Every structure is written in C-alpha cells, then in structure tokens.
Amino acid sequence: MPHPSPEIILAVITTDLTRVSGGGAPIFRVESQDELERVSLYLSRILEGAIHDLENGVYVIIGH
Amino acid sequence: MEKYQISMLVGITIGFLARIYLLRVDYRQYPSYPHGYVTHISFGFIAAALGAVAIPAIMQPDFTAVTFLAVAATQFREVRKLERETLENLDASELIPRGKDYIEGIARVFEARNYLVMAVALISSGATFWGNWVYGVAGGGLALLAAFRLMSGQVVGDISEVVPASLTFKESLLMVEGIFLMNVGLPAHREKILKEGLAVLIKPRQDNARATLDNLGQRQAILHVASALLGTKRESGELEFSPAVGKDIDTGKIAIFLLPMEPDMECLIEAIQRVPILESSLRRPLATRAGRAAAD
C-alpha cells in the first residue's frame, strides 16, 4: 500500500543548524530572517513546492 | 400519414427537444466545447428514436423491435464512460481539479438523461398513437416536467447556511473562525492573503448535511466551482494561494478559503450555495434508528 501522505520535504532552510539534523532533504544554512525568506521563496519557485514555517527559525519546502 | 408514422414523428421530435432542453439547463456542469454538444445531441436523437418506435412497433405487431431497448441501455452506458474519461483527462490540467466524485456525478447524469429522453419519447408517441398529436405533445411535456422535478437534486444552499467569515493568522497558520486551513511560510504571502482573500463558513443545518459535507469529493467540488466562477490567484507551481477547505471537528462546520480574482463576497456565497450535492456524497444517517439515536 502506498504511503497515505504523498507530501515530501524537498528542502530545509534555517538560520539555526542546531534545530535540524540529517534526513533526506538538503539543508540550507542562511544568516538572517531576510535571507531565510528570500531563499525560501526562490527554492519554492524552483522546486514548485509550498513554503511552510515551523516557527523556530526553520522553513521547509514541501512538495504537495 | 399512417397513425404509427405520426406517433413516431411526434415521439422523436418531443424527445429530441427534451434532450436539447436538458442540455441547456445544466450549463454549470457542462464543458462548453461544441463537439461535446454534437455528441450529446446525437445520442439524444438516437434515444428519442428508440423510445418513439417502441409502441408503434408493438402495435404493428413486431415484438422483436422491443429488443432494441436493450441495445440502447448498452449504448448509453458508453455515454457515461465517454463523459467520465473525457473529464478525467481534462481534470489533470485544471488548476483546481473537479475531483473524481464530481466527474462521476456528471457522467451519471449524462447517462440518466438519455433514459429520460427515451421515456419522454415513449410517452409522447404512445399518447399520439392512442389519442392524437396534441395529446402526444402535452404528454411529452408533462413527462419532461415530472422528470425535471424528480431529477433536480439538492444544492449546498439547501442543506446548509453559507455565511461570510474572517481570515486570521495564528503565527504562520491560516485560520478561518478558529478552523485551521494551512501553514503559510512567508510573511509577504500572509499579508496578501489577509488583504485579498475571502473566507466563508458552511454551517450544516442538521446531521444529514454534516455527514454529506464530510465527503472530500463534495468539498473538492465546492472548491472547483468557487474558483471557476470567481477565479483564483493560484498558479501552477505556486501553492501558497491555493483555495483551501477545513472542518471544525467538533461542530462539523466547513471553512472555505479562496484568493479570488474577483473579490466579491456575495458572488462567492451564491456560487457555493448553488454547488450541487453529489449523489455519491449524499448521506442520511438520520434515516436510520441508530443514526437518530446517536444524534441527540
């Protein structure tokens, strides 16, 4: 049976590397909130995914 | 003209007109390409001819002619398949798909309408055969009216109340009246959603309605119709502005969010109220004893 949720994390963008670890998706380390938002927007357009905010300085790009 | 010729002529004409009338009525469900019309009108003509020929054939008497009706049934099942396949193929390129349930509903309607046309043609040719053409026209008209009455299903506005609602963000979570819809990452996108987005609340009137609105196909149909009529700012590959739907798990209220091209709340409410209730999503828990007992 296929996995019930087809959602995949395509990329992780963070200002704080201690908040993430390992996993299948590439992690992008950025310096500021501004850069965080900009890089997230670029990646979401490139990957055709949606940007989600985990509210701890980590953004994820999800393919829906 | 011979009697049977007149009754066949009247039956075919009335049945054919009935098909055209039924095509006109369902403008919201119908994809508007002319070739689709040609297909359905031709099928309608065949249905009318089959219905009209039955009674004169029996009276002739030519009983084998009735077996044609069986052929017709097979034929019209093909209509359903044809319509389903077309719509499913087209659905892949819709920004907000209709969803399988809605498509199945439309396909079923198209099959059933051919049987209605056959019945109308049968009745009017019969009435002409035993009376005259005036009876035939009147009988066909009455049959069409009756069919139309019986076949017009409910719409969302019949089973629920649709009211305007307010959009808020709890940090990155988009909420409509406390119902969670989705997580929007970028503050710029949140601002745009707050400024231009519309939200409504669908309040089911009773438990049957609540169970019906639980159906995901029904909700998808609502999203499709709303964004088809008001437009959507969603773009391929840009998911932030997709319309969304969520349920209040305690009360069964449904929240709808849409970022429309035409931000007109009244039109949105009217569009949602007129979304048909899909046959496949219709539930009636209150029709059972256990359902009634559980409801209070």
Image: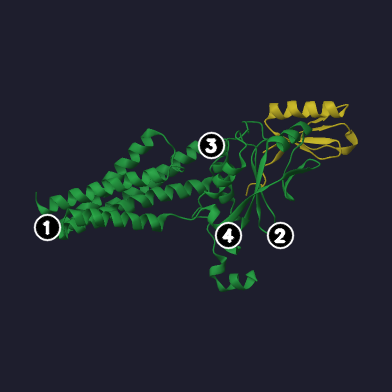
Chain colours: A yellow, B green
Residue B107 horizontal/vertical position (percent): 43, 47
Q: Nearer the viewer, residue B184 or B193?
A: B193
- Disc 2 on helix, strand or loop? loop
N-term mark: 3 or 1: 1
Kindly identify the amino acid type of the residue bearing the numbered disc 1: Gln
Q: Nearer the viewer, mark 1 or mark 2?
A: 2
Q: Nearer the viewer, mark 3 or mark 1?
A: 1
Question: How many angstroms separate mark 1 from mark 4 (CA)?
Answer: 52 Å
Q: Nearer the viewer, residue B276 or A31?
A: B276
Give the left or right position of residue B66, taking residue B209 as reference.
Answer: left
Q: Nearer the viewer, mark 1 or mark 4?
A: 4
Q: Nearer the viewer, mark 3 or mark 4?
A: 4
Kindly identify the amino acid type of the residue bearing the numbered disc 3: Ala
Question: How many angstroms separate mark 2 from mark 4 (CA)?
Answer: 15 Å
Q: Nearer the viewer, mark 2 or mark 3?
A: 2
How packed mark 4 is, by other alpha carbons closer than 10 Å (few <14, some 14-19, many 20 or more), is: many
Question: How many angstroms separate mark 3 from mark 1 (CA)?
Answer: 51 Å
Q: Which residue is mark 1?
A: B60
Q: Are marks 2 and 4 on the same chain?
A: yes
How packed mark 2 is, by other alpha carbons closer than 10 Å (few <14, some 14-19, many 20 or more), is: few
Q: Name the chain under label 4.
A: B
The disc at residue B209 is 4
Question: How many angstroms separate mark 3 from mark 4 (CA)?
Answer: 29 Å
* Residue that extends furthest to the front in the rendered view of this protein: B266
Residue A25, quarter of picture: top right
Q: Which residue is mark 3?
A: B92
Residue B45 horizontal/vertical position (percent): 27, 44
